[in-house]
Structure formats: structure tokens, C-alpha cells
Amino acid sequence: MATAASFRPEAARSPPAVQPPALPLSKFKVALCQLSVTADKARNIARAREAIEAAAAGGAKLVLLPEIWNGPYSNDSFPEYAEDIEAGGDAAPSFSMMSEVARSLQITLVGGSISERSGNKLYNTCCVFGSDGELKGKHRKIHLFDIDIPGKITFKESKTLTAGQDLTVVDTDVGRIGIGICYDIRFQELAMLYAARGAHLLCYPGAFNMTTGPLHWELLQRARAADNQLFVATCAPARDTSAGYIAWGHSTLVGPFGEVIATAEHEETTIMAEIDYSLIDQRRQFLPLQYQRRGDLYQLVDVQRSGSDE
């Protein structure tokens, strides 16, 4: 008969879980900018900047943008709107705007995602900027969105995009953030790895659709937050019923008990909410999952960390 002493919770994660770093801020405002996206790239960039500036003026220290906010979400548009992030400047106007506005406003910016061109490949890429405007991390969408529900929706990102190869956990002025993009939220293993790497917050720019949105969008956010006992923030485009791909909207902030702290409907808006990291320790004391994992029965292996010198 197994007893608590034989559960070996420390062995349930390999390598062992990393303790989160000390927090520069324990409580701060976050803004989720649910933007209306058009075919006019210059307009989208200007509108995103206006929303970021308004959020910072309202006291936000962390601002999130939606998935593919600088142009239409379509396989035809990904190549047309793609930017060369490494080249910067005129080759990457969306990237340049985000870097400059993060620096000028001294905020942490999770820049939603844009189509990135690198060599002969295209990626769905999220850039994270520090309050100095420097690029702190770049996440290329790991799990590409391929779906075929007869009579509902068919879409295959893999026709044009390449899947990313790296997990992305970034240390910022507002804590350690794990980054995923849209479909990445479906994979609990990714969230568990981020939690084991000491993330305080998971950010998922996303654009769920009118079929999967009402079914799964909030469900998945609350599951990722509750299972890993941390905060989850999502940011989606506003709904445009005339678009070829219609986004569900409903940008949301979820707390470490799976509670919805703030959420939008489907129109263009910015929601402001407070993140209080003290709730993470409180919830983990209430429900001490870290001491209850069955390392004698199962193990989550972080392949990338196992192969490093960490």
C-alpha cells in the first residue's frame, strides 16, 4: 500500500522544478488590448500603438497584444505581412514600433504575434520586450493550428508556416513569463514545463474561432491556470464577421485557482486588471499539489533542460 512518504513528488519532474525568481513587483496592472484588425497594415500598427499608450497611461506595467494583429489571419496574408525581425528597421515596422513604445513608456510588452520571415521560412512569432525596449524573448508558435471540422471550419497553418522548436520563458520586470501562441494553449505538457521552469504567468496571444472559441477558449485557460496554480493571460483580436477567419475574441485574465478575474466580449476594447502574485503562494498552500505528485508512478521530462548544463 502506497503511503505519502513513498510518493516522491520531487521525482515527478525531471530535472527538478526550478523555484521562481524573486519578484520585482508582487502586484501590478495588466492590459489586454483586444484590437480590431484590418487589411491596412499601417493602420493596424498605428492603432496598436494608440492602445498600448492608453493602457500605459492607465497604469499598466504589462501590456498584451493579440495573435496576428498587424494583418488578416490567413495563409494568403502570412507571406504578404511577414517581417524580417532580425533585419529590423523598414523590414520590420511592427517589431520596431513595439520596441520603441515599450522603451518610451517603460513597460513590459508581450507583442501578440506577427508573421515572421526568416530565410525561406515563415513563423507565427511572439516578441517580448522589456521596459528598456530590448527584445527579451521570441516565441515561434510550436503547435501549428490545423483543423478540419466538416461543415464548421477547415484551416491549416502548416500550409505556409513552420513550427517553432523552442520553449520560451522570459524574465521581465513583472516576473517570469511563459509564452505560447493560440493552439499552444491546448497542450498541458507545455504549461507544466513552463511551471516547472518557475513561471509566474503564462501569456497566450490567440485567435480561437467561432467553433472552438465558445467550446474551449475559457475552458483551456482556466484548466492551465488551475492545474499549474499560476496566472494565465490571453489576448485575442476583436471579432470581424466580414473576415475570412472570424475570431471569437474574449481576451481574459485567469487566476491561480482557475478563477476568471477579467474578460472581454468580442468588440475592440482594452481590459485592465490586477495581477497579485501573493495569490500563487496562497493557493499553493491551500492545495499543495507540488507535494502530492506521484513521482513513484509518473514523470514529466524537460528534454531541453535535460540536455543542457542546467
Image: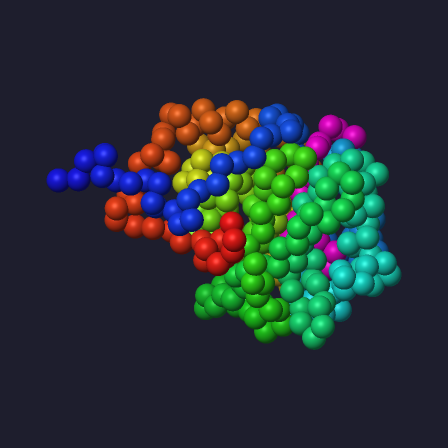
Check if residue 66 falls in the magenta segment: yes
In the displayed structure, does residue 292 sit left or right of residue 226?
left
Residue at x 33%, y 34% (from the top left corner): 291
Say above or below: 191 vs 281.
below
Please state which of residues 20 and 71 is positioned toward the viewer in this rendering. 20
User: Is residue 196 at least partly visible in the picture?
Assistant: yes
Q: Position of residue 249 (x, y in %)?
A: 60, 47
Tell me which segment is drawn in magenta. 57-72
Q: Position of residue 215 (x, y in %)?
A: 45, 50
Res 63 → quadrant: top right
Q: Residue furthest left?
A: 1
Q: Quadrant of the N terminus?
A: top left
In the displayed structure, does residue 58 sit left or right of residue 23?
right
Residue at x 48%, y 68% (from the top left corner): 148
Q: Position of residue 181 (x, y in %)?
A: 58, 54
User: Is residue 218 at least partly visible in the picture?
Assistant: no
Q: Residue furthest right?
A: 90
Please state which of residues 111 and 168 is positioned toward the viewer in this rendering. 168
Please state which of residues 269 and 42 is positioned toward the viewer in this rendering. 42
Q: Position of residue 190 (x, y in %)?
A: 48, 52
Res 272 → quadrant: top right
